[in-house]
């Protein structure tokens, strides 16, 4: 955090150096990303991202959306599809209208096309079986995504009862866990642990971590099959379910 001198912000552990939460998935030469935060450019340069086939959005808050203009080099010669719920797509079309459905073939603007996803309806996106699930981020309804046997549930403080049946039999759950104490729009670490136990994935990684949590110090709080995610973490799932980073 800017101007902070807490132990996490002064930590020399690279796992405590965090950019905004995002996920890159790769399968059979196709790549999709979940969310483009303000550091999207830095994240893309860091992993050497040179192609992109689609973007999924969880919601329209700035820390998940405002790197959208830096998509431009990756949509220079083709229209890049964006997906999200109706509210998120409406915000993208309003706030970044210059980049959506623009007529310039090889101009200086991103070339984006928006698509509204329906809750719980599986959609094949570039070979990935994408299933949006409803979460609540405070009083905002946003999307998590189940893709094969992995689910990505960031920015949530409540999972509605109708979503749980879509989270069964997961190999990997990535779940919001902001800090130690309560927050109105995010799970704290203890709430996240309980939610992870309820969902019962074979492995859980916690994300969207604030500087209130320190990777090394607080990992002792976590059950054996749970851990904190960290920047540049790369994992591989079975061939059936694809790869993700």
Image (cartoon, helix red, strand yellow):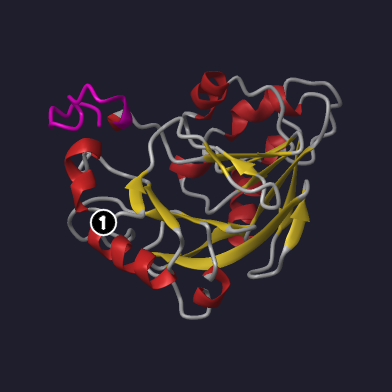
Q: Which residue is rendered at x = 83% and y = 31% of the image? A: 78
Q: Position of residue 93 (x, y in %)?
A: 66, 47
Q: Position of residue 132 (x, y in %)?
A: 62, 63
Secondary structure beneath label 1: helix
Q: How many marks?
A: 1
Q: Position of residue 195 (x, y in %)?
A: 36, 67
Q: In the rendered image of this protein, does residue 214 appear above or below residue 146?
A: above
Q: Position of residue 218 (x, y in %)?
A: 19, 45
What secondary structure prevails in the magenta region? loop
Q: In the image as oriented, which residue stretches furthest toward the left?
A: 6
Q: Which residue is mark 1?
A: 189
Q: In the rendered image of this protein, does residue 94 appear above or below residue 122?
A: above
In this rendering, position of residue 232 left or right of residue 227: right
Q: Which quarter of the image is occupied by the N terminus?
A: top left
Q: Is residue 46 magenta?
A: no
The one of 160 and 149 positioned closer to us in this rendering:
149
Q: Which residue is rendered at x = 46% and y = 63% of the image? A: 201
Q: Can residue 11 be seen by looking at this rendering?
A: yes
| Stretch in magenta | 1-15
Crowd tier of the residue under label 1, counting other residues whose Cα lies within 10 Å: few below 14, some 14–19, many 20 or above = many
Q: Can residue 138 be seen by looking at this rendering?
A: no
């Amino acid at each position: 955090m800017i101007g902070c001198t807490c132990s996490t912000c002064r930590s020399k552990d690279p796992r405590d150096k965090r950019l905004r939460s995002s996920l890159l998935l790769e399968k059979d030469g196709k790549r999709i990303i979940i969310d483009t935060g303000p550091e999207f450019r830095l994240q893309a340069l860091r992993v050497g991202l040179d192609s992109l086939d689609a973007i999924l959005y969880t919601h329209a808050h700035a820390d998940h959306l405002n790197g959208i203009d830096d998509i431009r080099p990756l949509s220079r010669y083709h229209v890049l599809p964006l997906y999200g719920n109706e509210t998120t797509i409406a915000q993208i079309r309003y706030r970044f209208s210059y980049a959506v459905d623009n007529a310039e073939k090889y101009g200086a603007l991103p070339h984006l096309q928006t698509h509204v996803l329906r809750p719980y309806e599986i959609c094949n996106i570039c070979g990935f079986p994408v299933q949006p699930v409803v979460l609540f981020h405070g009083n905002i309804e946003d999307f998590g995504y189940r893709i094969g046997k992995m689910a990505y549930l960031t920015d949530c403080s409540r999972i509605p009862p109708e979503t749980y049946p879509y989270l069964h039999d997961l190999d990997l759950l990535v779940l919001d866990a902001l800090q130690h104490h309560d927050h109105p729009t995010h799970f704290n670490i203890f709430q996240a642990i309980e939610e992870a136990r309820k969902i019962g994935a074979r492995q859980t990684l916690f994300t969207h971590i604030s500087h209130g949590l320190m990777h090394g110090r607080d990992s002792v709080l976590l059950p054996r099959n749970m851990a904190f995610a960290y920047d540049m973490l790369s994992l591989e799932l079975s061939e059936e379910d694809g790869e993700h980073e």
